[in-house]
Amino acid sequence: MKRSVLQFLALALFLAACKEDGPIDDGRATDQVDSKAAAYANTALDDTPEDDEFFRVYADSQSYQFSGICVGCKVENPEKAIGRNLDDYSTLKIGLGVLGKVQQTLLFPDQGTIKLAIEIGTDDIPLTVELLKGITIETVNDGKSNNDAKAIDASILKIGSNTPTRATILLYPDYYKEYDGVKITLDGGLLILNGGLRVYGAYFLDHQYSECGNLIPEDPVAYYGMGGFNSPTMVCGGGARNLDARWEEFKFSARFPEIGETMTMSFWAKINGSIIIRAYGMEILLNPTNGSITRKGIKKNIGYATFGEMSFFKIVCARQTIYKDIVEIRVNAGRPDIAEFATSKFDSGLETETIALSKAEIDEFVIHDKIISPKTEYALRCIHGMNQLGCSKPTVASAKRM
């Protein structure tokens, strides 16, 4: 009897410990993953190699080649530059002054659209930008170059503080350029690196992070932090701001990705005057009293409550029937405004999308190629700790419309 009691107590203690350490597999796997995502919400790729293993996509195949007069050029252990093991490596070797090139291309199992990391190193020589000036990096897609080759400089090279013989190269491809590989090229005419270049591996994160390091949920197809524009910190990093009544136009550095019949655009804005968004064949005028949406020459008026404070905007574009498209605008978690148009593809046809501001500011512009879920809308509204109504917990009823 005493043994049974002790066994029962041991089992109870074991179950209590399991409950504290994490959920048992009882159908709550989604919640468990969501909790892990939240735990790493402040982790960015810039923190390599300490960023979250959970989100990494590693190169899983490779190829290499030589060009020009490349006597003595070789790639040792090429297969060790792929996979999750960042302790072994391939070595790219080329003679000093040789008029040739050595290239190794690392290929990923999936396409990426956001920044990626290449882990490199030397045998015993501390790395510097000058030492690596004969190396270029470029992304490729379906065997073709994305024409974004970049020489190593201080903006993309992060040398290990404790291991100066190792470094991480961080690339920031344009958001509309997909890639499935990265090519590393050593130019013998420029390289001053003895002993060869070690390539430990390459990977990207399959989730997008904001400029603040917050995880943006539901895999957006594009994210524009607006940090390249002219304002101080707003919601997250810099944004676009014009406090004057005269219009000022801001052009995005890269085209918006192609979208079919459904998408969601979301952003933060403070509007005391007006904002005009020109994208995807639409001109969207936002102001506190008499906004409008114009598409294919058809203008539909919209109206909503005044929003002179920093607010969260969600614009949903969706095919409702074979004859009718819906464009819905929601401010914070309030009442939506809806405009109906004849069906057509949401395609801007513009070389560069623009935003025009008059006594307004905008930040954190995100595009999804789907109608985002209520959970994602809640996360986008509440991720930056803004004083948002309903941010204590998500409510499907308040966020769901279509």
Image (cartoon, rainbow, N blue to C red):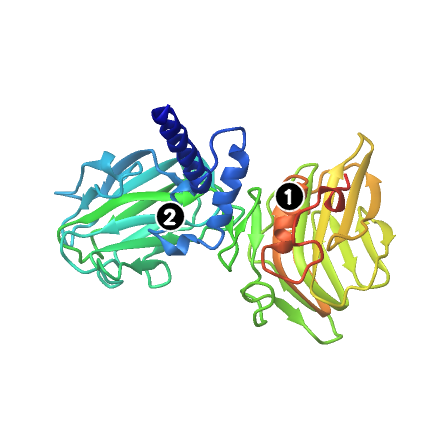
**Rendered residue at 62%/55% (across/down):** 382
Judge from the rendering whether residue 70 lies leftward or rightward of residue 272; answer left or right: left
Query: SS at mark 2?
Result: strand
**Rendered residue at 34%/50% (across/down):** 137
- Classify residue 271 by image quadrant: bottom right
Query: Considering depth in this image, is 328 or 309 the residue closer to the camera?
Result: 309
Task: Specify the farthest residue to the bottom.
Answer: 244
Residue 367 placement (x, y as % from top left):
62, 48
Query: Considering depth in this image, is 375 or 310 the residue closer to the camera?
Result: 375
Label tally: 2
Q: In which quarter of the image is the C terminus?
A: top right
- Residue type for callout 1: Lys
Residue 1 placement (x, y as % from top left):
37, 23
Residue 280 placement (x, y as % from top left):
69, 47
Q: In this view, does 74 lie above or below 131?
A: above
**Residue 379 visible, this orientation:** yes
**Rendered residue at 81%/51% (across/down):** 335
Q: How crowded is mark 2: few (under 14 residues within 10 Å), some or many (20 or more)?
A: many
Q: Is residue 402 above or below residue 303?
A: above
Q: Sequence order check: which comes first, mark 1 or mark 2? A: 2
- Residue type for callout 2: Glu
**Residue 207 visible, this orientation:** no
- Classify residue 372 by image quadrant: top right
Proximity of marks 1 and 2: CB atoms separated by less than 8 Å:
no
Q: Nearer the viewer, mark 1 or mark 2?
A: 1
Judge from the rendering whether residue 58 lies leftward or rightward of residue 176; answer left or right: left
Q: Mark 2 points at which residue?
A: 138
Judge from the rendering whether residue 344 lies leftward or rightward of residue 258; answer left or right: right
Q: Mark 1 points at which residue?
A: 375
Residue 131 placement (x, y as % from top left):
21, 60
Q: How crowded is mark 1: few (under 14 residues within 10 Å), some or many (20 or more)?
A: some
Q: In this view, does 137 lie above or below 80?
A: below
